Image (cartoon, rainbow, N blue to C red):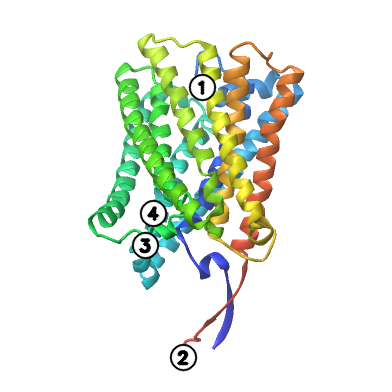
Amino acid sequence: MSKSTVSAADQSYSPLYFLASLGAGGLAVTFFMYLMFWVPHPGRPVPVFEDLMAVLASGSTPLKAAVVIAMVGIAIFVFLNVKMLIWNFAALSRFKTTPAYEKLRQTNGETTLLAAPLATAMTINGGFIVGLVFVPQLWSVVEYLFPAAMVAFVLVGIWAFRLIGHFLGRVLAEGGAFDMTAHNSFAQLLPAFALSMVAVGLSAPAAMSGNTIVVGIGLVLSTFFGVTAMLYAAYASVTAFSSMLMHGTAREAGPTLLVMVPLLTVLGIMMLRQDHGLHTAFEVHGAPAETLILLARILTIQIVFLLLGLLVMARQKYFSDFVFGSQLSPGSYALVCPGVALSVMLHFFINKGLVGAQIVDKFSLAFWVLTALALMFQAAMIALVLRLNRQHFKASVPRTTAVPAE
């Protein structure tokens, strides 16, 4: 016999490791916020390669630095996002051949499989960002890409619905198939999160296309997946909260209490994209103050759930054991999404809300003080991702393998 070492993730695989890919993709989005709101992009809803080159050619030194940092950050974290997605699909394929997978399909944990379409939808979004930032003249052919993107997102949505259908069909058709005592977390909101990621992807063509038909299809499809996500989240959160009041919060599932934060950011961006599509294609105009109030309401709910989740996890000493300690839980990657989501939502709240309603001047002292909060969340999540990756993917767990006979 010979001894080798493997990572903790390889040794004890869980579909929740797809969240490692998701978190990396989310961090790429936080870097894109620099470009979205700081780089001029006249005549287009988003900045493209040519806008970035114009800044690098004649922009101010601070803006040039921001563009370079953003481009490097996007490249690094999209690469990590794709790398972790590929690793997860390979690991999931192996996992499906084990008894542990069959057991998973018979428990509440079956919904963790929804992490796969969730991460895949994020990767598609990340791919579009890479195209905007690094591909010259992409905007000249973007109208051909929107239908292809919608097909891709719909396929991911069908995949998610099939997984949800298998789960709900089993638990609703078979008495006692769902364990309410193990429902004491927000883990069951993962399907809603997956559907919302599909919805926000489908809303992109609605916001950016100049073709009325494409905009209309994007509006309808994104509404379908978005509203379905809201319905699922409402049912799952109410029943979970009832179970948590009776049994307390499952300690390892503590980070799921924060899943409402990224869920609301994704749905909020979907709504903003839909409003933009209604404005450009159908002459439906909304006031900047209405956008401010929408974003303020979303941010308020996010802060409430953030405080609730942090309170419970602090009481249960989650961080000292699973983040800064030696205990490992794949669910720890769920901590990345809320921080990323708050960073992104703060950028939208500041730029689309406060600046749009002319409460704060763009690039003023107040603007940068508020933006610093978004940058702090981003920096903290980068540090968290690097630490979690070292904990879970460093080859340190002994494994004994047989040496082939010669």
| Residue on which the image places disc 3 | 107
Question: Is disc 3 placed on a helix, strand or loop?
Answer: loop
| Residue on which the image places disc 2 | 405
In the rendered view, does 191 fall on the left or right side of 62? left
Mark 2 → mark 1, Cα distance in angstroms: 67 Å
Q: Residues within 10 Å of mark 2 (few under 14, many from 20)?
A: few
Residue 108's x, y, as percent? 38, 58
| Residue on which the image places disc 1 | 294
| Residue on which the image places disc 4 | 111
Instruction: Looking at the image, tell me whether mark 1 or mark 3 is earlier in sequence order.
Output: 3
Residue type, numbered disc 3? Thr
In the rendered view, does 342 fall on the left or right side of 18? right
Mark in front: 3 vs 2: 3
Residue type, numbered disc 2? Ala
On the question of residue 322 being in view, the answer is yes
Tell me which residue sits at (70%, 26%) in the image.
370
Residue in the foreground of this view, choosing between 106 and 385 = 106
Instruction: Looking at the image, tell me whether mark 2 or mark 1 is earlier in sequence order.
Output: 1
Whether label 3 touches label 2, CB < 8 Å: no
Mark 2 → mark 4, Cα distance in angstroms: 42 Å
Question: Is disc 2 placed on a helix, strand or loop?
Answer: loop
Q: Residues within 10 Å of mark 4 (few under 14, many from 20)?
A: many
Residue in the foreground of this view, choosing between 62 and 305 = 305
